[in-house]
Image (cartoon, rainbow, N blue to C red):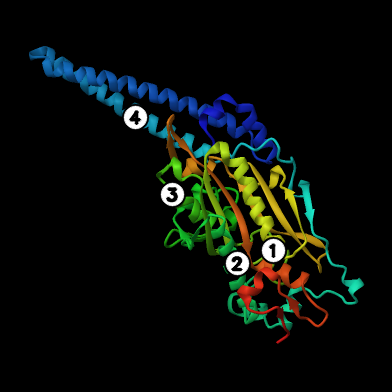
Amino acid sequence: MIDLKVLREEAEAVRNSQRVRGEDPELVDQLLAADDLRRNAIVEFEKYRAEQNILSKAVGAAKGDEKSALLENAKELAAKVKSTDAIRAEAEVNTQKILLKISNLIDSNAPVGGEADFVVLEEIGTPRDFAAEGFEAKDHVELGKILKAIDTERGAKVSGARFYYLTGMGALLEFALVNYAISSATKAGFIPVIPPVLVKPAAMEGTGFLGQAAENVFHLEEDDFYLVGTSEVPLAAYHMDEILDESSLPLRYAGYSSCFRREAGTYGKDTRGIIRVHQFDKVEMFSFCKLEDAAAEHQRLLQWEKDFLNAMEIPFRVIDVASGDLGSSAIRKFDCEAWIPTQGTYREVTSTSNCTEFQARRLNIRYKDATGTKSVATLNGTLVAIPRMIVAILENHQNADGSVNVPLALRPFLGVDTLLPA
């Protein structure tokens, strides 16, 4: 959540942030009004409580009729304390409720607009000219069948649309990608983590996924658990309600987990293959750092993502995501999009977001320095989302006979140079 002090001092900046996100700027005025009521209620409550404390001491020293009169006054004052405390509590709840609806204060450098208004920052690598090589590129579904690596038909039979099996070399390719990702992250100083994928509401709400993203979250109502759509959620909540040592920052974790998404609102989109699915595995980077270090940390996460894609020998581009497509927690987000030959376009394979103190305030994660206790900043970045990376590898490294060359970086983990038709 945003800082109420920032809201009071920079209300117009918060209104503008809401506007460029395509969200309701009137929430800012509602929150300012609720905050005024809350603060006035606190003043009233504390005034009557102070009077009650003074009166309590006077009652103890009084005798006879004076004591009886004071006791009668004490009853009236106790009623006022109780009443103003109830008003204060209600005002606190109302303020918090509105506060949770307001997104993070956007970075002024983020492009303004909707999903299509991103800015391309760089393009790396050159897409292959398959026509010049004398054959037509096959898509990942066809290659998956040739290699007996991907089985979407049986996935649909067992679980429904947008599910799949990875088999044989497909499964081994996932293990190779995960092992390479974790090995790379560990060398870079990340602590490897296998987190839970079922979390309590506080963890899901604290990371901002029960707002505008709630429609894509699987909820197990009987047990009140949520299935995570990314290990960002359990990694962010790992230090919930803790005060971290300043000397430990930045704290970097690399979480490997299965991820679950309802893909609401995507009816008819990417129904073929494994680009948009309900369940997939991913290695996610997560960082806790000081606010003043967050922008530089964001660039580091982006560079690690670029290093991974370069190691996979895949053409890709980096985009600066526009304001209306950021999600409530992020002030700025960069996506890396891999070239998909059979679609003739770039598709998102990794993403990294700077969430500043937004999630940490919700989750009550702080650190202490010489000047006091402060909220940490949180950042996240996908190192590898398995299905889309498999799509990119198969399509970009395919040969005319349906075999696929294995990127050099993966060969020690996979044990072969080429995936051969089964």
Quickly name the residue at label 2. Answer: 180
Q: Amino acid at mark 3?
A: His
Q: Give the label, 3 or 2, closer to the camera.
A: 2
Measure the alpha-carbon separation of dots 2 and 1.
10 Å
Q: Give the label, 4 or 2, closer to the camera.
A: 2
Q: Amino acid at mark 2?
A: Tyr
Task: Please identify the residue farthest to the left as the structure is shown.
Answer: 64
Circle on res. 311: 1
**Circle 2 SS class:** helix
Q: Amino acid at mark 4?
A: Asp
**Circle 4 SS class:** helix
Quickly name the residue at label 4. Answer: 85
Q: Amino acid at mark 1?
A: Ala
In this rendering, would 358 be left or right of 47?
right
Q: Earlier in the sequence, mark 3 or mark 2?
A: 2
Measure the alpha-carbon separation of dots 4 and 2.
57 Å
Quickly name the residue at label 3. Answer: 239
Q: Residue 238 at what x, y percent from top left?
A: 45, 52
- Residue neighbourhood size for the residue with mark 2, other residues' Cα within 10 Å, grouped as few (<14), some (14–19), many (≥20): many
Q: Residue 190 at what x, y percent from top left?
A: 53, 55
Q: Is the Cβ of the residue at disc 3 closer than 8 Å to that at disc 1?
A: no
In this rendering, would 82 be left or right of 327?
left
Q: Earlier in the sequence, mark 3 or mark 4?
A: 4
**Circle 3 SS class:** loop
Q: Residue 85 at what x, y percent from top left?
A: 34, 29
